[in-house]
Image (cartoon, rainbow, N blue to C red):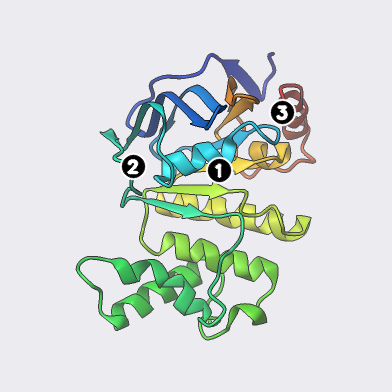
Amino acid sequence: MSGPAMSVSAPATSLPAPAISLHGVSKHFGDLQVLSDIRFDVADGESVALLGTSGCGKSTLLNIIAGLLGPDTGVLSINGQPAGGAQHPSLSYMFQEDRLLPWRTARGNAEFGLEAAHPVLPASERHALADEVLQMVGLDGFGHVYPHQLSGGMRSRVALARSLVTAPRILLMDEPFSKLDPQTRSQMHGELLRIRSLRQVSVLFVTHDVEEAIVLADRVIVLAPRPGRVREIVTVDLPHPRKATEPAVAEAIRQLRLLI
């Protein structure tokens, strides 16, 4: 496939200063092989989408990278160091559900990840960091509000703030905006792009949405199912912001759909 917007290459095995490296990663659940020989890197500061149909192992792969599951074979490295099966301190995970604690305010939810910090941070410092990330995601002045008082988009912003409060170098996201309406989802895309540029964070996200992959990603890892394996790696060479109505973006979306 060729075109001005995208190029397809063989699965990459090395990128300069990789934030994430996977080499020959496979996974079984009993007799079922879920992933087979996964190989790709995510460069420092890069945004990469994992795209594919249901059953291709996208979420399983993200859980392996997050340290929630171990691979059966292969090597996973985070920031150049072999991962030891636990969540790496420079990594944060934003789940598909916002998982906000209903008895905590927005600030209380945002600062949750700081409570396990070593050494223990004083409450005043935790509050200040939580307020900082809430302001970053557009929720300045909402720190006292409880989850049931927030819209779906605002809850997603709190979840994003919670993921950013520890200042991660790598952000993993498992379809975090899939339950939002199209307008709110588009707003969250803009927020993520802005924060990624501000914080210089590497992003690896799972999506079923071809348009979302093109709008957000520098590269798209297309997985084929049963077992999940890398079908193509697609480079998206378009400036941000990207709107689906723009001819070049629309063509990139069309080309990518042909690979699913």
Q: Nearer the viewer, residue 193 or 169?
A: 169
177 vs 80: above or below = below
Say which mark, if any, is on residue 85.
Answer: 2
Q: Is residue 42 left or right of residue 248?
A: left
Task: Identify the element where label 1 is drawn.
Answer: strand
Q: CA distance from mark 2 to mark 3?
A: 36 Å
Residue for badge 1: 205
Q: Residue at x 69, y 52 (%)?
A: 178
- Residue that appears at 30% across and 77% down: 125
- Disc 3 and disc 1: Cα gap in Å? 19 Å
Q: Is residue 133 above or below residue 169?
A: below
Task: Name which quarter of the figure residue 131 lies in.
Answer: bottom left
Q: Which element is circle 3 on?
A: helix
Q: Which residue is mark 3?
A: 252
Judge left or right: residue 193 versus residue 90: right
The amino acid marked with disc number 2 is Gly
Q: Pick whichever of labels 2 and 1 is earlier in the sequence.
A: 2
Quadrant of the snapshot with the N terminus: top right
- At 72% across and 57% down in the image, what residue appears? 179
